Structures are given as C-alpha cells and as structure tokens.
Amino acid sequence: MLRETDREIYLALKKEKEKQSATITLIPSENIVSREVLEATGSILTNKYAEGYPGKRYYGGCSHVDEIERIAVERACKLFGAEHANVQPHSGSQANMSVYYTVLKPGDKILAMHMSAGGHLTHGVAANFSGLFYKPSFYTVDRESEMLDYGKIREAALSLKPRVIVCGASSYSRTIDFSMFSQIAAEAGAILLADIAHIAGLVVAGIHPSPVPHAQFVSSTTHKTLRGPRGGFVLCRSEYASGINSALMPGIQGGPLMHVIAAKAVSFRDALRPGFKAYQEQTVNNCKKLCSEIAGRGYRIVSGGTDNHLFVIDLVNKGITGLEAQELLESVGIITNKNLLPFDPLSPKVTSGIRMGTPSITSRGMKEREMEKIAGWIHEAIEHKDNNPVLKDIKKQIRRFALEYPIYPAA
Ligand SMILES: *Cc1c(COP(=O)(O)O)cnc(C)c1O
C-alpha cells in the first residue's frame, strides 16, 4: 500500500482528499466522479497495451479490452445519437487535435472563438499547436450584449473561407446555436467542429441543443459536466469514421488508456439513466440561482446572466483582479479560477474576471438554498478582503458547511 511504501505521495493524496472534502469547488470544468468510475480508473486495465481498434489490434491478448472498447463506443453513439464514436482521445485537447489532423493540412485556415470571449487553447491560440500548425482567425462576442453575433461570424466566415469553423467554448454562459453555425459553415464551404467539452452533460440531458445533427465533428471531454473520468472522445458522421480513427492512432496517439476507456463506458451508462437529467437540471438551476444571488449583491455578470452551468463575474468595479479574487477565495475555502473578460485589458495570468460553475457542488447534493449561502460568503470575503479575523471566520463556516456534503457519502 502507498501508505507504507510511498509516504510522500500518500500524504499529498490524503491532503488533497481532505481539501476536496472541506472546500467548495466552483471550477465549472471539475466534477466528482462516481465510485464506479473511480474503480474502473484504478483497475488492472492500466496493465494492458491495446494499440489499434477492437478486432484490429497490434498487440495480443486484447479480447477483453476489445469488449470494453466496443461497449464504450456503442454507449457513446447511443447517448448522443451519433453515427460513429472514437473513445480513445486521452483528453479534450487530443480530441480536437485528431479532428484537425483528419481534415486539415498544416497552414490551412480555421475560424474559432477568441480565448477572451470563451474559446479554448486548442482553438488556435498562438502558444498552442493549433495556432502554430494552422492559420487561425477569431470571432468574438458583441461588445454590448457580450453574446455571439452570428451576423458577424457569417461575414468573417464568408470573407475568410476557412477549412474548419470551430464552435463551443470554455467560458461562454449562453446557449450556442449550432444550427446557425452549420448554416454559416455550409455557406462558407467549411467543415464544422462543435467542441462540447463543457456542456456535454447538458446536451445529453436535453438542456442544451445537441450539435450532433448539425456538425460533421463533435469533440468533448468526459470529465466536465458529463461526470466521467479525465479524458476525451470524438463523434462524427460515418464518412469520417476511418479518417478519425487513423488520425487518433497512428496519427497522434499510441496505446489507448483502457482503464480510462472502461471508466468512460461506466459514465456513459450513468448518463443514460433517468437520474442524470435531474442532476443536470439541478446543476443549471443552481447556477442560475448562484449567479442571480451574486448579481443581487452588486456584481456585473458577463452577458448579464447564464443559460448553463457557468458564468463569469466582471470584477472591474470591485477594485480586485481575477487573480487576487481567486487567491482570496481560495484562502477561505472556495476554489474558483480567474478568467478573461471579453476585451479584457489585463493579461490571462491576471485577468479582470472570475469564472464559477456548479457541476461539482451539485454532485455533492447542494441545492438553491446552499447557493444563497455560498453567494453570501463570496461577497463577504471580497468586501472584507483585508480583514483577517473576518476571513478566518468565513473559512471556518465554509469548512463546517462543506463537510456536511461529503464527496463520497458513507455507503
Ligand atoms: C476543457 C476543454 C478542452 C480540453 O480539455 P483537456 O482535457 O483539458 O485537454 C477543449 N475544449 C474546450 C472548449 C474545453 O473547455
């Protein structure tokens, strides 16, 4: 056991477990997986090499992992109504890379959402492979409404003629019109990639429209609202099935993580169950409640509110940067992350905003009443940011509160 053989890792892991239990996680990309997902992720499947695909492996002894991957693919297709699924991407970033690798050549043009408006690193940011290998252009949100302006996106698409248009985001709190994006892509002669890394769980629950009928490719993570293990997957039309499979392997990855694929299959089955829809609805209701409670205390919310599991607070009129707010809130036991505002004058390392979301606290059983309390603590901490006794008292209250909602309740 680690406890005896590797004290360093054992103790750090133990402290992390205590921290997760005694704090409140408002990072919208994090969640708490089921015990079954943990069990599969920590299983002996990590011992197995399985380069290739079920029935066509480059290694022997794959009959059982073949069965597992077939089940995972079948469940993913059923869950999203997709023609083809590849469950091998190690992460959401690799899912996107595999789509680019399938349809783009180096130097080809892509059009995607700017990071300050909510786009992801893999949507063409200069420091990322996607900005280095391809030629990115960006659309952003309208300055006034801070929502997507489809007229402008259409203009950009028609004048640029990109090979791929990417829609989907990491910090956009509004519903995305995938059907509109598909019309724009068709007019511009572009392929549409819908990246639903954040909202996959909402899509499954029918709370956010699905991109599957509209986009040639859909990429996602499994670990955000979908509440599965850390990983990614790609859905596509049958015509691209063999392309995406060979892009993943041998194109950009070697052996798949079969323990993670088993855990993905487990989480896909969880998502097929009726309780999953109720969980996603509660996540969104909690988010709307938390958002309105915070707005009610004098904070400006980007775009004025939220339709999904997350929102971004503008801290400009509060005399505190995103980085300072993140550190302040962490000091009282609320884990969040700083986030750029659309057109943010500050750098991504500092930012003028902070992003919050409710998947993790909803998994712990919190409801609207708890959102009022959390909003109150966030406001109190920011109001008393230089008053240590007050901050200490808030931290104590949060600790007591968080422990009432165990991350893994005793069975
Ligand atoms: C989180 C995210 C990803 C990538 O996820 P990783 O697993 O961290 O690589 C891709 N796209 C979007 C929009 C995301 O929010």
Image: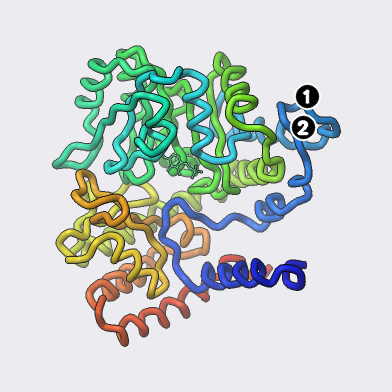
Q: Position of residue 138 (x, y in %)?
A: 28, 30
- Res. 55 mark: 1
Identify the image quadrant of residue 42. bottom right
Which residue lies at the image location 59% right of the left edge and 19% below the top edge? 241
Tell me whether circle 1 and circle 2 mark residues in contact (CB < 8 Å): yes
Colour setting:
rainbow
Residue 141's quadrant in the figure?
A: top left
- Identified at 61% across, 17% down, the residue is 242
Q: Is residue 124 left or right of residue 31?
A: left
Kindly identify the residue that appears in the image at 66 percent across and 58 percent down.
Answer: 35
Where is residue 183? Give x, y as percent.
33, 18
- Give 371 or 333, whichever is nearer the viewer: 333
Q: Write down the quadrant of residue 6 in the picture.
A: bottom right
> In the rendered view, would you say 32 is above or below 104?
below
Q: Looking at the picture, which amino acid does disc 1 mark?
A: Gly
Is 409 or 188 nearer to us in this picture?
188
Element under disc 2: helix
Q: Label 1: few (<14), some or many (≥20) within 10 Å?
A: few
Q: Earlier in the sequence, mark 1 or mark 2?
A: 1
Name of the residue lying farthest toward the bottom: 389
> Residue 357 location, x and y as percent?
39, 55
Q: Is 103 drawn above or below residue 81 in the view shown?
A: above
The verdict on label 2 being within 8 Å of ligand 1 is no
Q: Work out which quarter of the rendered image holds the C terminus and state it.
A: bottom right
Q: From the image, tell me which residue sits under label 2.
A: 66
Is the residue marked by circle 2 packed among few (<14), some (14-19), or many (20+) residues within 10 Å? some
How many numbered markers are drawn? 2
Q: CA distance from mark 1 to mark 2?
A: 7 Å
Q: Is 317 left or right of 265, judged from the image as shown? A: left
Q: Give the structural element (helix, strand or loop) at label 1.
A: loop
The residue drawn where x is 66% and y is 44% is: 260
Q: Amino acid at mark 2?
A: Asp
